[in-house]
Image: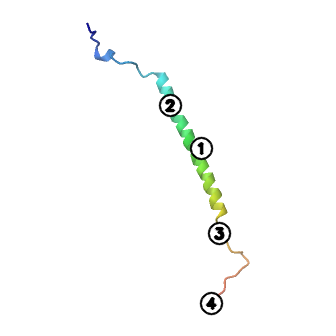
Amino acid sequence: MTKIVPEDKARQGHWGWHALRILIAGLLLAFIAWAAVEVYGEMIKSQTTGQNAPQAPAAEQKPTQGG
Protein backbone atom coordinates (compact mmCIF):
# COMPACT_ATOMS: atom_id res chain seq x y z
CA MET A 1 0.00 0.00 0.00
CA THR A 2 1.43 3.38 -0.99
CA LYS A 3 1.57 6.18 1.49
CA ILE A 4 -0.11 9.44 0.47
CA VAL A 5 2.08 12.42 1.28
CA PRO A 6 0.71 15.98 1.22
CA GLU A 7 2.31 18.28 -1.36
CA ASP A 8 3.84 20.65 1.19
CA LYS A 9 5.55 17.75 2.98
CA ALA A 10 6.90 15.99 -0.15
CA ARG A 11 10.07 18.07 -0.38
CA GLN A 12 13.37 16.32 0.17
CA GLY A 13 15.02 19.15 2.01
CA HIS A 14 14.73 22.81 2.75
CA TRP A 15 16.95 25.76 1.98
CA GLY A 16 18.60 26.73 5.18
CA TRP A 17 21.49 28.80 6.41
CA HIS A 18 23.99 26.12 5.43
CA ALA A 19 23.06 26.24 1.74
CA LEU A 20 23.00 30.05 1.79
CA ARG A 21 26.48 30.18 3.31
CA ILE A 22 27.82 27.82 0.65
CA LEU A 23 26.31 29.90 -2.16
CA ILE A 24 27.68 33.15 -0.73
CA ALA A 25 31.13 31.62 -0.22
CA GLY A 26 31.16 30.42 -3.83
CA LEU A 27 30.15 33.86 -5.05
CA LEU A 28 32.88 35.52 -2.99
CA LEU A 29 35.48 33.10 -4.33
CA ALA A 30 34.36 33.87 -7.88
CA PHE A 31 34.74 37.62 -7.24
CA ILE A 32 38.20 37.10 -5.75
CA ALA A 33 39.29 35.05 -8.76
CA TRP A 34 37.85 37.67 -11.13
CA ALA A 35 39.71 40.47 -9.33
CA ALA A 36 42.97 38.52 -9.45
CA VAL A 37 42.62 37.96 -13.19
CA GLU A 38 41.83 41.66 -13.74
CA VAL A 39 44.92 42.76 -11.81
CA TYR A 40 47.10 40.22 -13.60
CA GLY A 41 45.74 41.30 -16.99
CA GLU A 42 46.42 44.97 -16.27
CA MET A 43 49.91 44.12 -15.08
CA ILE A 44 50.69 42.22 -18.30
CA LYS A 45 49.17 44.97 -20.45
CA SER A 46 51.24 47.68 -18.79
CA GLN A 47 54.46 45.64 -19.19
CA THR A 48 53.93 45.00 -22.89
CA THR A 49 52.87 48.54 -23.75
CA GLY A 50 55.76 50.04 -21.78
CA GLN A 51 58.36 48.08 -23.75
CA ASN A 52 57.01 48.79 -27.22
CA ALA A 53 56.10 52.44 -26.74
CA PRO A 54 57.77 54.80 -29.23
CA GLN A 55 60.15 57.27 -27.70
CA ALA A 56 59.36 60.95 -27.95
CA PRO A 57 61.89 63.18 -29.75
CA ALA A 58 64.34 65.03 -27.57
CA ALA A 59 63.21 68.46 -26.39
CA GLU A 60 66.35 70.12 -27.73
CA GLN A 61 65.61 69.20 -31.35
CA LYS A 62 63.74 71.87 -33.28
CA PRO A 63 61.63 70.93 -36.26
CA THR A 64 62.78 72.35 -39.57
CA GLN A 65 60.57 74.95 -41.14
CA GLY A 66 59.86 74.69 -44.81
CA GLY A 67 59.55 77.67 -47.08
What's the residue at 25%, 6% (across, down)?
1
The residue sitting at the bottom extreme is 67
Q: Nearer the observer, disc 3 or disc 4?
A: 3
Disc 3 target residue: 54
**Spatial CA span between label 3 and label 2:** 47 Å
**Spatial CA span between label 1 and label 2:** 18 Å
Residue 48 position in % (x across, y down)? 63, 59
Disc 4 target residue: 66
As drawn, the label of residue 36 is 1
For residue 27, above or below residue 65: above
The residue sitting at the top extreme is 1
Q: Nearer the observer, disc 3 or disc 2?
A: 3
Between 5 and 58, the residue placed more toward the observer is 5
Q: Amino acid at mark 4?
A: Gly
Disc 2 target residue: 24
Q: Amino acid at mark 2?
A: Ile
**Spatial CA span between label 4 and label 1:** 53 Å
**Spatial CA span between label 3 and label 4:** 25 Å
Position of 67 with respect to 30 (left or right) is right
Q: Nearer the observer, disc 1 or disc 2?
A: 1
* Secondary structure at numbered mark 4: loop
What's the residue at 53%, 38% (across, down)?
30
* Secondary structure at numbered mark 1: helix
**Spatial CA span between label 2 and label 4:** 69 Å
